[in-house]
Image: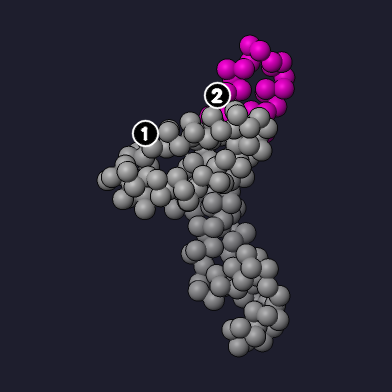
Amino acid sequence: MIEAAQKDPSRFAELYELHFERVYAYVARRVRDRSEAEDLTSHVFHQALANLGKFKWRGVPFAAWLFRIAANSIIDRAQKLTHESSPRSLTSDAVSEAQDLEKIETVARLYRLVDHLPWDQRYVVRLRFAEEKSIREIAMELSRSEGAIKQLQFRALQTLRARMRDKDV
């Protein structure tokens, strides 16, 4: 969809529809003023459309790119309000936004790392943590013992921890 939108900007509407709610929710939680959240969300998508040609797939979801634009827009807004508000509260807001952005990037990196696990480990991690299934349910689904599922989960988590510590991956 991204490549199609890069070639034909009229296809950006599909990306907008797919990501609008999450970006709006992200902005609204941080801005807390509906009108301002709507304006900032609109700004995010205008920026995304204007810079879509610069987007390159690097293993991080497109949504993370949109969240980065949103975080930068929120910080820019806070800086513009510096003259009207107390600098201390804006500084803490900017720090909070930077921390949120770091969390988003960490989660995106984790998703990418999960995609590189062996098939059976990846499947167990997704069922266990995304679908919140029990060890017993996963064992029945894969026709394996509960011990085997626990071992797959253990190995997957060990691999993910090691790779998360390695910043180059």
Task: Give yes or no for contact between labels 2 and 1 (Cβ–Cβ under 8 Å).
Answer: no
Residue type, numbered disc 1: Ala
Furthest-top residue in view?
Answer: 83
The magenta segment: 73-99
Callout 1 secondary element: helix
- Label for residue 23? none
Q: Mark 1 points at which residue?
A: 50
Left or right of 43? Residue 127 is right
Is tag 2's residue or tag 1's residue first in the polypeptide sequence? 1
**Mark 2 residue crowding within 10 angstroms, few (<14) / some (14–19) / many (20+):** few
Q: Residue type at mark 2? A: Asp
Q: Give the vertical position of 113 relative to 135 (above or below).
A: above
**Viewer-closest of 111 and 79:** 79
Q: Pointer 2: what residue? A: 76
For the point 50% across and 74% down, the residue is: 119
Q: Nearer the observer, disc 2 or disc 1? A: 1
Q: Can residue 169 be seen in this view?
A: yes
**What type of secondary structure mainly makes up the magenta span?**
helix
Residue 159 sits inside the magenta stretch: no
The residue at the point 66 percent across, 12 percent down is: 84
Q: Quadrant of residue 54?
A: top left
| Mark 1 surroundings: few (<14), some (14-19) or many (≥20) residues within 10 A | few
Q: How many labels does the image show?
A: 2
